[in-house]
Image (spheres, helix red, strand yellow):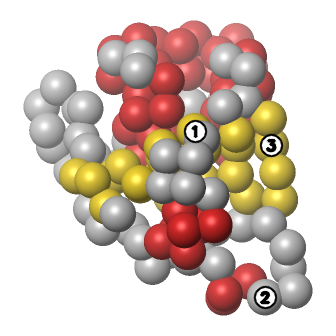
């Protein structure tokens, strides 16, 4: 089930899905995640939204990456992922979007249930 989630202090519709997802999955504040990603981005000389960078950040937080099978890529939506994984903490990468899944519910500022994930991180 979709749970509307936007920890952005201004509640703006910003392109900060990675920060929102990490906040939901870890319980960290928006500012804490933002500063952590920006600090790592500064060190690596890249943008905080780069997939490999936030992946590195998640790895430091104890998350592990997994790919979804390519045999039926349209078969797995965010909503279907939640049904298949009703327990646990995950962050899904779906194209240029990231969404948190906690115990079968997906947390996002908008209903991203029809997005197609390519990979996920398990906390």
Residue pointed to by mark 3: 65
Residue at figure coordinates x 39%, y 68% from the top left: 112
Q: Is mark 2 on a helix, strand or loop?
A: loop
Image position of 33 with respect to 118: above or below = above
Query: The C terminus appears in which quarter of the rendering?
Result: top right
Q: What element carries label 3?
A: strand
The circle drawn on residue 108 is: none
Viewer-side label of 1, 3: 1
Q: How far apart are the two marked residues, 2 and 1, measured between alpha carbons?
A: 23 Å
Query: The N terminus appears in which quarter of the rendering?
Result: bottom left
The residue lying toward the viewer, choosing from 104 and 108, is 104
The residue lying toward the viewer, choosing from 78 and 16, is 78
Residue pointed to by mark 1: 89
Viewer-side label of 2, 1: 1
Residue at figure coordinates x 83%, y 59% from the top left: 67
The circle drawn on residue 72 is: 2
Q: How far apart are the two marked residues, 1 and 3, measured between alpha carbons?
A: 12 Å
Residue 34 coordinates in the image, percent (x, y)? 43, 21
């Amino acid at each position: 089930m979709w749970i509307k989630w936007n920890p952005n202090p201004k509640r703006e519709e910003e392109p900060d899905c990675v920060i929102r997802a990490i906040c939901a999955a870890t319980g960290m504040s928006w500012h804490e995640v933002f500063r952590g990603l920006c600090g790592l981005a500064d060190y690596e000389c890249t943008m905080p939204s780069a997939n490999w960078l936030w992946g590195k950040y998640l790895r430091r937080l104890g998350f592990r990456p997994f790919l979804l099978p390519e045999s039926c890529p349209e078969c797995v939506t965010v909503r279907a992922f939640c049904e298949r994984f009703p327990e646990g903490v995950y962050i899904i990468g779906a194209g240029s979007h990231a969404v948190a899944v906690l115990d079968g519910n997906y947390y996002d500022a908008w209903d991203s249930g029809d997005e197609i994930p390519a990979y996920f991180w398990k906390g």
